Image (cartoon, rainbow, N blue to C red):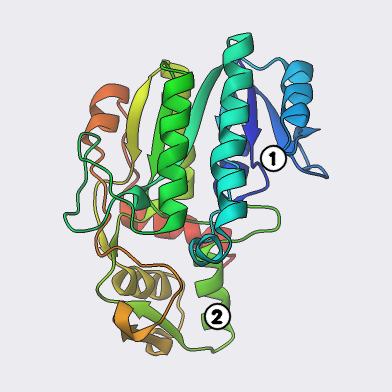
Amino acid sequence: MRVLVTGAAGHIGWRIAHFLRDKHHVVAALRAGHIGGLESVEMDITAPLSIRTAVDRIKPDVVVHCAAITGVDECELDKETCWHVNVEGTRALAEECANIGVRMIYVSTDLVFDGEKGNYSEGDAPNPVSYYALSKLEGEKVVSSILPSATIARTAIVYGVGGMPARGFTLWLVESLRQGKKVRLFTDQIRSHFYLGDCARAMGALLEGGHTGIFHLSPGRSESRHEFGLAVARALGLDESLIEAVKMEDVPSEAKRPKDVSLSNAKLVRETGFVPTPFEETLEFLKKEFVV
């Protein structure tokens, strides 16, 4: 298949694009520049004409839409830009896909939930508590209304190396600990930390299986941010004593943080046959990615 990946320089988009290129003709949609080893096309997600020009040129079978402003506090501070990119940009892309009959996979987030329940399934009602999450939920609604056969892939928080340049929580954590810096991680925020390689595999399963509707991309387990950080430090031989246990109330932020947005992966496993990599094995993969 010809697959156009928006946001291909981002943490998730970069990994998905590189994974899919082994089986498909992948084109990376970028605002500017290029990614080594991938065909690329310039696309400004905020400009409908740019979207139309790129899609018409590439003529994809599927668009995997990863492009978004993902900084939760950033979105809280600049709601107008957040909405323009995450909602209006998504609307313009979905409309172009509808116009020429292209399938779309929209990458959403576990943060669409309020965190009061945990282990959320696809049937649970979203209730975002931050503007970023609200914009992603609105993006889901826009895509589903314009493209009823679209796929909505809500990803749990991911870990691993990805992006151009490389970015993400794991990179920040590992680099901070290697530099001897103290880090503060929450004991009262629960997430389903999902290995980036597995996230890309799950996306491939949805794409190749032609699955539609909402799916939660998750390892099916969860732990606190603090527990996860300690596990990474142990696996990479880093100083665990640099990791300070704190509560969310101890660290002020612009956006409200949900307590437990862990995701059930039962539907993903049942309908696609996806099997998550055991957590300890993913930590071995991390050691290789960070050249330990």
Q: Residues within 10 Å of mark 2 (few under 14, many from 20)?
A: some
Query: What residue sits 18% from the left and 58% below the top?
Result: 116
Give 87 or 189, whichever is nearer the viewer. 87
Q: Are marks 2 and 1 in contact (CB under 8 Å)?
A: no
Q: Horizontal and vertical percent for residue 64?
A: 56, 30
Farthest residue to the right: give it: 33
Query: What residue sits 34% from the left and 68% below the top?
Result: 228
Query: What residue sits 53% from the left and 88% below the top?
Result: 181
Q: Which mark is residue 92?
A: none
Look at the picture and state if 173 lies above or below 87: below
Amino acid tagged 2: Ser
Amino acid tagged 1: Thr
Q: Horizontal and vertical percent for residue 110?
A: 35, 49
Image quadrant where residue 154 sits: top left
Query: What residue sits 23% from the left and 43% below the top?
Result: 264
In this view of the protein, can residue 202 be seen by the observer? Answer: no
Image quadrant where residue 256 sits: bottom left
Per the image, label 1 sits on a secondary structure element best described as loop
Q: Which mark is residue 176?
A: 2
Farthest residue to the left: give it: 117
- The mark tally for this picture is 2
Look at the picture and state if 276 lies above or below 39: below
Give 84 or 181, whichever is nearer the viewer. 84
Question: Pointer 1: what residue?
Answer: 46
Look at the picture and state if 181 lies above or below 149: below
Give 111 or 21, whichever is nearer the viewer. 111
